[in-house]
């Protein structure tokens, strides 16, 4: 009983800064949860860390745009953007340019946004991880024992994805060609998901919850499926093994099969995007409930905060699982679709 009372006392003491912070934020106006959640989920030209007393602590990211009117490149920080450029809130804060005729156009924008910076961080982390594992294998003796610890865990994951996903889905004959791509996709998605769960810099960016990034990954899988598919794969699309009336004179089944060429990568894109964005949105919403509770008073603060903290712990544990599951599912479905493009000719 004493332990429970001590735990509750520590919980109240830990929540006191949240009460003061929420009360201070409430002075400036009503807490807008939807704006906070959508702001954290969207991409940006700066890396926002915290806000206090109306001032934002942010890391400015380089803006790189090419003027559609003059063709001149501009390199600057977001706060020093030239007057002919502006951030259009109606288009998710993207940079637009005012043309001499009064119209607004979207210039060529190669800026290092928050999502792009997070991708670079993921790449650096992956290079460090696999560089370390590579050095271990390079310097080990031929008679040395199997790897342990971190290197052993990485070997287990690589062997699992390679043997149980890539090899079993594509087949013994072709799997080695696609294994590097599929392993890269798996570890990129997994690492981006895990770093995205870290609430402070250099984590927190919603990379796999950005539909542009999931679309690029899906297009890469689509190219791997269709550019190297064998003749049996294309035969099943344009002249499938169905009754003649279903493929001529009205090509019903060929149209459906051809439509499937595009729906497969579309499903990959939407599944990864929707699941990761929803997870981030739920976690951010429960975080906002903490501040909303304290702004309503101590009684509401204690009740809502205990509930929110418990749900946050549950959702973060669930998101750790989802981070692996989504990387696994994307890789598995890509491997299955690639395997379907290399099916052997059926012998009648």
Image (cartoon, rainbow, N blue to C red):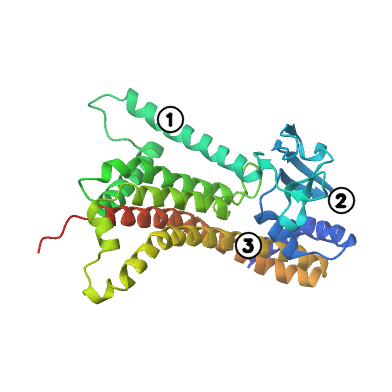
CA gap between label 3 and label 2 equals 24 Å
Residue 110 visible somewhere in the drawing: yes
Q: Return the disc, 3 or 1, that comes first in the chain's sequence.
A: 1
Residue at the disc numbered 2: 54
Q: Residues within 10 Å of mark 3 (few under 14, many from 20)?
A: many
State the residue at coordinates (16%, 56%): 345
Residue at the disc numbered 1: 131
Please indicate whether residue 321 sits to the left or right of residue 116 in the image.
left
**Image x and y of residue 268, in percent:** 44, 58
CA gap between label 1 and label 2 equals 43 Å
Residue at the disc numbered 3: 281
State the residue at coordinates (79%, 65%): 294
Q: Residues within 10 Å of mark 1 (few under 14, many from 20)?
A: few
State the residue at coordinates (76%, 62%): 291
Relative to 124, is 51 above or below? below
Q: Quadrant of residue 174?
A: top left
User: In which quadrant is the C terminus drawn?
Assistant: bottom left
Q: Quadrant of residue 290?
A: bottom right
Q: Return the disc, 1 or 2, that comes first in the chain's sequence.
A: 2
**Image x and y of residue 117, in percent:** 62, 40
Circle 3 SS class: helix
Q: Are marks 3 and 1 in contact (CB under 8 Å)?
A: no
Of residue 133 and residue 342, the one placed in the foreground of this image is: 342
Of residue 5 and residue 302, the one placed in the foreground of this image is: 302
Residue 209 visible somewhere in the drawing: no
Circle 1 SS class: helix
**Image x and y of residue 296, in percent:** 82, 70
Image label count: 3
User: In which quadrant is the N terminus drawn?
Assistant: bottom right
State the residue at coordinates (47%, 33%): 127
């Amino acid at each position: 009983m004493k332990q429970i009372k001590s735990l509750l006392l520590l919980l109240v003491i830990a929540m006191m800064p949240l009460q003061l912070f929420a009360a201070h934020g409430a002075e400036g106006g009503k807490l807008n949860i939807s704006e906070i959640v959508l702001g954290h989920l969207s991409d940006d030209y700066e890396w926002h860390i915290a806000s206090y007393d109306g001032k934002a602590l942010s890391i400015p990211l380089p803006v790189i745009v090419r003027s559609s009117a003059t063709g001149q490149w501009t390199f600057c920080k977001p706060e020093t953007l030239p007057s002919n450029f502006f951030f259009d809130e109606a288009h998710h804060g993207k940079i637009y340019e005012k043309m001499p005729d009064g119209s607004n156009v979207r210039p060529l924008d190669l800026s290092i946004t928050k999502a792009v910076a997070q991708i670079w961080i993921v790449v650096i982390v992956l290079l460090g991880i696999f560089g370390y594992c590579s050095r271990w294998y390079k310097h080990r003796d031929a008679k040395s024992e199997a790897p342990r610890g971190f290197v052993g865990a990485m070997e287990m994951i690589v062997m699992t994805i390679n043997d149980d996903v890539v090899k079993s889905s594509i087949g013994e004959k072709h799997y080695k060609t696609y294994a590097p791509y599929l392993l890269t996709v798996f570890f990129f998605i997994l690492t981006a998901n895990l770093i995205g769960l870290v609430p402070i810099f250099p984590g927190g960016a919603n990379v796999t919850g950005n539909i542009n990034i999931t679309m690029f990954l899906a297009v890469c899988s689509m190219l791997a499926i269709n550019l190297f598919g064998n003749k049996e794969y294309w035969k099943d699309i344009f002249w499938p093994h169905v009754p003649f009336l279903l493929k001529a004179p009205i090509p019903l089944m060929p149209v459906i099969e051809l439509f499937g060429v595009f729906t497969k990568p579309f499903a990959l894109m939407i599944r990864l995007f929707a699941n990761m964005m929803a997870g981030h949105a739920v976690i951010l919403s429960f975080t906002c409930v903490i501040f909303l509770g304290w702004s309503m008073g101590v009684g509401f603060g204690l009740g809502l905060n205990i509930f929110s903290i418990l749900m946050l712990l549950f959702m973060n544990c669930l998101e750790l699982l989802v981070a692996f599951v989504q990387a696994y599912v994307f890789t598995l479905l890509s491997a299955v679709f690639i395997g379907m493009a290399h099916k052997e000719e059926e012998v009648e």
